[in-house]
C-alpha cells in the first residue's frame, strides 16, 4: 500500500524534515507514525496524498508513484484529517463541506447528493447537515472532516494527532468510527506523539525522530524501546 524509498525533504529555510527514510506497509493496515513534535510525521503524510512531491528518493502509494502527473489523482484517493478541524471544516453548512470534494471531482448533482448523504450517515452526522460547522463540537468536526474524505471514496485515511482537541467521549466515538472504516476495508494511518495510543490501536508502528526512522514493527517494538 505504501512504499517509501530513501525519501528526503528539506524546507526552503533549510530545515531538513526527512532524512533518507525507507519503509513499506502492506495493504489494509492500521499504522501509527510515532514520534515527538517536529520529527517529520506531518511532512511524511503530505507526501502520501501528493501535496508534497519527493525532492529525493521516491514514494509509492496504492501502486502509484507520487509525482507531478499523479498528484491530483492521489488527493482523491488518500484523505488527510488535519490536527485542528477548524482548518478543514469551515463552509457555511456541513452539507457544503462534505460536498466540496465530489463537486471538485466533477460528479453530477445526483451523484454528489448520494455521496454526501452516505458519508454523513456513516459518520453519524446526517442530522447536522444544515448546521454550520462553527456550532459543532471538535469531535463532530473531526467526524465531518472524515465524511468529506469518505465522500471522495478514498482508500486510505490519515489522521494527524487524532485525539487532539477531543474529550474522552469524542475520542471513543472517533476510534469506533475508525474501526468500522477499517473493517470495511480502508487503511488507516495516524501520526501521534502518544506512545499508549500507538500501542493500543496500531498493528504496525513506525518510530520517528529528527526526520529519521528509529524502528518499525509491531507493538513489541516499543516494549524493546522502552
Ligand atoms: P511533526 O509532524 O512530527 O511534528 P513536522 O513534519 O511538522 O513534524 O516537522 C518536521 C520539521 O520540519 C520540524 O523541524 C519543523 O519545525 C519543520 N517544518 C515543518 N513545516 C515547516 C515549514 N513549512 N517550513 C519550515 N520548516 C518546517
Ligand atoms: P431536507 O431534508 O431538509 O428537505 P435535504 O438535506 O434532503 O433537505 O436536501 C435536499 C437537497 O438539497 C439535497 O439533495 C441537496 O441537493 C440540496 N442541499 C441540501 N443542503 C444543501 C446545502 N447546504 N447546500 C447546497 N445544497 C444543499
Image (tube, grey):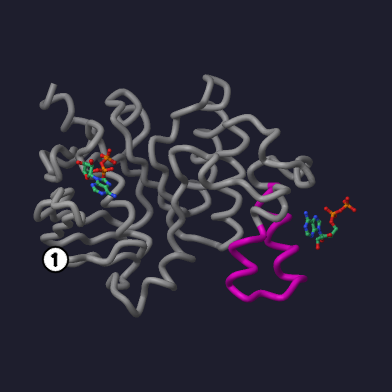
- Residue at 43% in and 35% down: 162
Main secondary structure along the magenta-highlighted residues = helix
Mark 1 CB near ligand 1 (8 Å cut)? no
Number of on-image labels: 1
Which class describes the residues within 10 Å of circle 1: few (<14), some (14-19), or many (20+)? some
Q: Is residue 225 magenta?
A: no
* Residue highlighted by disc 1: 57
User: Percent from the top left, x then y, of residue 7?
Assistant: 15, 59
Q: Nearer the viewer, residue 64 or 18?
A: 18
**Dividing the image into four equal quarters, which quarter contains ligand 1?**
top left
Q: For the C terminus, which image quadrant?
A: top left
- Residue at 46% in and 53% down: 186
User: Percent from the top left, x then y, of residue 221?
Assistant: 16, 32
Q: Nearer the viewer, residue 222 or 105?
A: 105
- Residue at 72% in and 75% down: 108
Give the side of residue 222 with respect to residue 52, left or right: left
Quadrant in the rendering for residue 173: top right
Q: Nearer the viewer, residue 89 or 157?
A: 89
Residue, far bottom = 69
Q: For the N terminus, which image quadrant?
A: bottom left
- Residue at 36% in and 46% down: 189
Q: Which residues are magenta?
A: 99-121
Q: Is residue 117 magenta?
A: yes
Is 98 drawn above or below residue 142 in the view shown? below
User: Percent from the top left, x then y, of residue 79?
Assistant: 46, 55
Give the side of residue 198 with respect to residue 139, left or right: left
Is 7 drawn above or below residue 224 in the view shown? below
Q: Nearer the viewer, residue 15 or 196?
A: 15
User: Percent from the top left, x then y, of residue 163?
Assistant: 45, 29
Look at the numbered disc 1 and give the secondary structure of its residue: strand
Amino acid at each position: 500500500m505504501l512504499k517509501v524509498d530513501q525519501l528526503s525533504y528539506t524546507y526552503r529555510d533549510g530545515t531538513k524534515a526527512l532524512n533518507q527514510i525507507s519503509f513499506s506497509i502492506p495493504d489494509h493496515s492500521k499504522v501509527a507514525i510515532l514520534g515527538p513534535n517536529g520529527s517529520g510525521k506531518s511532512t511524511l503524510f503530505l507526501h502520501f496524498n501528493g501535496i508534497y512531491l519527493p525532492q529525493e528518493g521516491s514514494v509509492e502509494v496504492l501502486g502509484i508513484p507520487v509525482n507531478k502527473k499523479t498528484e491530483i489523482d492521489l488527493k482523491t484517493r488518500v484523505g488527510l484529517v488535519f490536527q485542528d478541524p477548524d482548518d478543514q471544516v469551515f463552509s457555511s453548512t456541513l452539507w457544503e463541506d462534505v460536498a466540496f470534494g465530489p463537486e471538485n471531482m466533477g460528479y453530477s448533482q445526483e451523484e454528489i447528493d448520494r455521496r454526501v448523504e452516505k458519508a454523513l450517515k456513516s459518520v453519524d452526522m446526517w442530522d447536522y447537515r444544515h448546521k454550520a460547522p462553527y456550532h459543532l463540537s471538535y469531535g463532530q468536526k473531526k467526524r465531518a472532516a472524515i465524511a468529506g474524505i469518505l465522500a471522495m471514496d478514498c482508500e486510505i485515511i490519515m489522521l494527524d494527532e487524532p485525539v487532539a482537541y477531543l474529550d474522552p467521549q469524542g475520542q471513543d466515538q472517533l476510534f469506533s468510527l475508525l474501526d468500522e472504516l477499517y473493517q470495511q476495508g480502508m487503511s488507516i494511518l495516524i501520526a501521534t506523539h502518544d506512545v499508549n495510543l500507538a500501542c493500543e490501536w496500531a498493528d504496525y508502528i513506525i518510530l520517528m525522530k529528527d526526520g529519521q526512522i528509529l524502528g518499525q514493527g509491531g507493538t513489541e517494538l516499543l516494549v524493546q524501546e522502552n
